[in-house]
């Protein structure tokens, strides 16, 4: 049954995926044409960064497209699969689309760096490409996309669950906005506590070089600053997102009418 869900969601998303990849190609071609016109190919990088940032909203957008299809067919009410399976199918297909696009963007970035930078230009002291920093960039984009997607799924399910209460139906949007703001405010306040910050600092990973280093090439200027990444916020954030996923599945198992 789960394979059938994946196939159905992929077929629904396939056309949109090709449209997005086509848009990536068009934006990159426009950036390359602009950079070539000015005879400074490094001007392509702002276009590439725009593509990277676009992936933050790509995952929730793909999930939203699949949710709209579910709303039309009322599959939540008539399907026999559990809420977690239905959600997981949409998350996996949306994730596949985003990873495919990220891979294409990474290849375009690599090609652009090889074209715009001379062979003897060392971005790092060992002369290697910034692979680790690229992993961090892709990881941050992926985590950001997952965060917005799971919050969107949860709020969507909670919004429709309120239809069972006629007195609240007209103020559902107010409740949804208030719920999100209250939860975010509480979390922000808790993370500001000195005790919590001390706990976060107990597990860190050194990133980059121990000191700040600057490299310049034409109009490009790179500053690499060493620092530490707190691991506990990442772990707790993953647990937080898992709770949102399970809560959304629980709401759907109650046969939320959409």
Image (cartoon, rainbow, N blue to C red):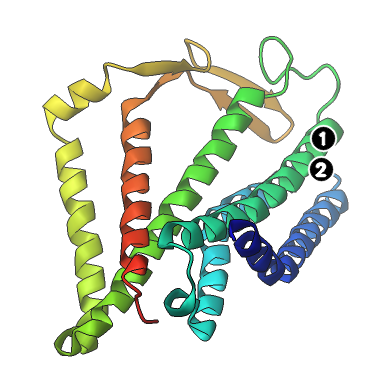
The front one of 97 and 79 is 79
Q: Picture coordinates of residue 11 (x, y %)?
A: 71, 68
The front one of 222 and 65 is 65
Q: Quadrant of the C terminus?
A: bottom left
Residue highlighted by disc 2:
41
> Which quadrant of the view contains residue 69?
bottom right
Q: Residues within 10 Å of mark 2 (few under 14, many from 20)?
A: some
Q: Which residue is drawn at 26% across and 24% down?
A: 200
Going from the N terminus, do you reach mark 1 or mark 2 first?
Answer: 2
Residue highlighted by disc 1:
116
Q: Picture coordinates of residue 66 (x, y %)?
A: 56, 70
Q: Is the residue 234 above or below the residue 249 in the image? A: above
Q: Which mark is residue 220?
A: none
Q: Is the residue 146 above or below the residue 193 in the image? A: below
Q: In which quarter of the image is the N terminus?
A: bottom right
> Which quadrant of the view contains residue 213?
top right
> Which quadrant of the view contains residue 218?
top right
Q: In screen coordinates, is 112 left or right of 221?
A: right
Marks 1 and 2 sit apart, C-alpha to C-alpha, by 6 Å
**What element does badge 2 sit on?**
helix
Q: In screen coordinates, is 197 left or right of 257?
A: left
Q: In screen coordinates, is 57 left or right of 206?
A: right
């Amino acid at each position: 049954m789960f394979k059938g869900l994946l196939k159905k969601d992929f077929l629904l998303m396939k056309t949109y995926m090709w449209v997005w990849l086509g848009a990536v190609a068009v934006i990159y071609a426009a950036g390359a044409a602009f950079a070539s016109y000015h005879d400074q190919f490094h001007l392509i990088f702002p276009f590439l960064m725009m593509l990277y940032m676009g992936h933050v909203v790509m995952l929730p957008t793909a999930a939203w497209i699949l949710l709209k299809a579910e709303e039309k067919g009322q599959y939540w009410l008539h399907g026999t699969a559990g809420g977690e399976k239905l959600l997981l199918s949409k998350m996996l297909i949306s994730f596949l689309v985003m990873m495919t696009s990220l891979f294409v963007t990474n290849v375009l970035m690599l090609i652009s760096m090889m074209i715009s930078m001379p062979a003897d230009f060392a971005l790092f002291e060992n002369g290697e490409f910034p692979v680790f920093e690229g992993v961090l960039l892709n990881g941050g984009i992926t985590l950001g996309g997952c965060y917005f997607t799971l919050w969107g799924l949860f709020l969507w399910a909670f919004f429709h669950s309120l239809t069972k209460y006629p007195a609240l139906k007209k103020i559902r949007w107010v409740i949804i906005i208030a719920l999100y703001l209250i939860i975010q405010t509480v979390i922000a306040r808790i993370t500001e506590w000195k005790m919590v910050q001390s706990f976060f600092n107990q597990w860190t990973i050194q990133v980059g070089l121990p000191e700040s280093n600057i490299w310049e090439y034409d109009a490009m200027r790179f500053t690499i600053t060493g620092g530490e990444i707190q691991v506990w916020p990442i772990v707790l954030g993953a647990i937080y997102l898992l709770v949102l996923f399970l809560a959304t599945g629980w709401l759907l198992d109650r046969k939320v009418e959409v």
